[in-house]
Amino acid sequence: MTYYDITFHELSGKSIIKRSVPSDKTNFDAWQDACAAIEPDFLHILVNGDAVSLNRRYIVRIDCQEVSDPTEKAITAKDELAGVINTLSNMGF
C-alpha cells in the first residue's frame, strides 16, 4: 500500500489537500481514492471531517505526491523523542 498527498487545484486559485491517502492504484489514479464519491459533475471529498464538493468543471489540476507511511513516521518520531529523553536523563536533567 502506498500513501499519497492529493492536492486538488481550482480555477479560482484555491486548493484542497487530502493528506496520507492510502491507495493501491498508480500515481495517476490515486486521486480517486481521496474522493468519498465521484459523479460526472462533482467530486465529493471528506477533509478533516468536513464534506467538500468540487465542481469538476473548475478543477484545473490534481497533484499526487507519494509520502511515507504515517504509522512509520509516528514510530520514528516516538523513537527520536525517547532518544532525546534518554540523553537528557543521562546528563542529569
Image: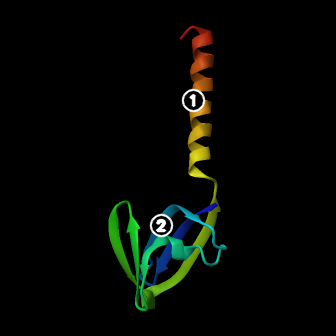
Marks 1/2 in contact by CB < 8 Å: the verdict is no
Quadrant of the image for the N terminus? bottom right
Q: Residue furthest right?
A: 26
Q: Position of residue 66 (x, y in %)?
A: 64, 63
Q: Is residue 93 above or below residue 67?
A: above
Q: Position of residue 61 (x, y in %)?
A: 54, 81
Q: Is residue 35 above or below residue 71?
A: below
Identify the residue shown where x is 61% and y is 10%: 91
* Mark 1 vs 2, N-terminal side: 2
Mark 1, residues whose alpha carbon is within 10 Å: few (<14), some, or many (≥20)? few
User: Dot 2 corresponds to which residue?
Assistant: 17
Mark 2, residues whose alpha carbon is within 10 Å: few (<14), some, or many (≥20)? some
Number of disc labels: 2
Q: Quadrant of residue 82?
A: top right
* Residue type beneath disc 1: Leu
CA gap, disc 1 and disc 2:
28 Å
Q: Position of residue 50 (x, y in %)?
A: 32, 65
The kind of secondary structure element at disc 1 is helix
User: Dot 1 corresponds to which residue?
Assistant: 81
> In the shown orientation, is residue 71 left or right of residue 45?
right
Q: Is residue 25 above or below residue 19?
A: below
Identify the residue shown where x is 61% and y is 78%: 29
* Residue type beneath disc 2: Ile
> In the shown orientation, is residue 64 left or right of residue 14?
right
Q: Is residue 49 above or below residue 27?
A: above
Q: Position of residue 13 (x, y in %)?
A: 45, 78
Q: Quadrant of residue 74?
A: top right
